[in-house]
Image (spheres, grey):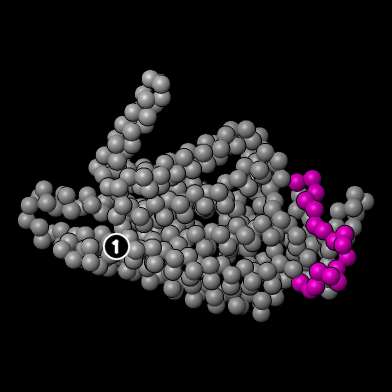
Amino acid sequence: MGIHGDFQHLPTDLQLHHTNGHVPRAGGEMNGTGNIMTHRRNKTIVVEVFFVGFESLTEYKAPFFLLLFLVYTFTCIDNSLIILLIWKSPRLHSPMYYLIANLLFCEIIYVTNLVPPLMHSTLSGRWSMDFISCLVQINVMICVTSVETFLLTLMSYDRYLAICQPLRYTTLIHNRLCLYFVIAFWIVSLVFFSAIFYLLLSLVFCAPVAMEHFVCEYTAFFSFACIMSDRLPLIIFGLVVSTIMNAPFLLILVSYIFIVISVLKIKSSVGRKKAFSTCGSHLLVVSIYFGIPFLASMVPGGGDYYNLMAAIYYGVPPLINPLIYSLRNQDIHKALQTAMSAIKQYFSGKIRQ
């Protein structure tokens, strides 16, 4: 998924085709059908990335596509409805709900980045993607995941203030401060995006890129680079980013340690239950967000089990997060009731006219 050398010095007809559902082998030349695996000084100019191991899905094309379509549609609808509800309801104009709306917006971007290309591959039966699209998919995933991690950290701090510092809550966090933080989160994540995009684009390959995944996966992708000096900056940058991204997890952990200590000091069981209910939804989302990757990391890259864990991580949280935040949330219930009443009154007035 990288290009070596100048575009202007390359023949215009150099391209890599996916032939009859098989990945071309390195070292191939132009065949009778015009399909080419091109080499330049024993280096492959990769213009397409292949996803192998999906032959069994060809006979389940229709149900798999329908499943993807339903998951994508419901994910976009339920996330958009909660965002719209938070935007329209004055009772939800608080830091926590502002952060939830931004988190759900990230989820919409996330599934839109992953599911439509997968739906296209399912229908066409062509499990491949051009390398620029693969680069974009990798970097959008990294960018959005970074923003989500920062948002979850700030939401944990919000819950800490609400339970441990209730009297100082409004002075320590407010909507304008959250706006500044969200802007900073996106700027930092876009810097990550730009750096990784540049490093991935400079990679050189000696063989076709054929991943045992259903999406473009960062670690699997750069492992195909044949020149170690090209991979080294990505490895170092990945370690730096991983270290930075571990800090939010530690902050979340510390926040909940203080929250648990504060809640246990409450003598009333009703008070403890109420305190836990204020952070229960967020704690569940955080557990899913960090728990599934932890389980997947204990499995070697690729393979059916790894892909199953990846599919759960990519598809389930964006679908269920709006439900987690809304099912037992009285503020959202009341805002929804108010919105439904306003809609009924609007249509009643239209009918009478």
Please, what is the three-letter code of the amino acid marked with disc 1?
His
Quadrant housing residue 244: bottom left
Report x, y in % for residue 132.
69, 60
Q: Residue at x 44, y 65 (%)?
A: 183
Quarter of the image with the N terminus in it: bottom right
Q: Is residue 210 visible?
A: no
Neighbour class for label 1 at 10 Å: few (<14), some, many (≥20)?
A: some
Report x, y in % for residue 96.
31, 56
Q: Farthest top residue?
A: 352
Q: Residue at x 41, y 24 (%)?
A: 350
Q: Nearer the viewer, residue 19 or 150?
A: 150
Q: Secondary structure at mark 1?
A: loop
Q: Farthest right residue?
A: 32
Q: Residue at x 35, y 47 (%)?
A: 86
**Secondary structure mainly formed by the magenta segment:** loop
Q: Is residue 345 magenta?
A: no
Q: Is residue 12 magenta?
A: yes
Query: Is 63 left or right of 2, judged from the image as shown?
Result: left
Q: Residue at x 68, y 48 (%)?
A: 127
Report x, y in % for residue 5.
79, 73
Q: Nearer the viewer, residue 118 or 305?
A: 118
For label 1, the residue is 174
Q: Farthest left residue?
A: 267
Report x, y in % for residue 171.
23, 66
Query: Is 25 left or right of 115, judged from the image as shown?
Result: right
Q: Nearer the viewer, residue 61 or 321?
A: 321
Quarter of the image with the C terminus in it: top left
Query: Is 107 left or right of 136, judged from the image as shown?
Result: left
**68 is higher (above) or lower (below) than 213:** above
Q: Which residues are magenta?
A: 4-21
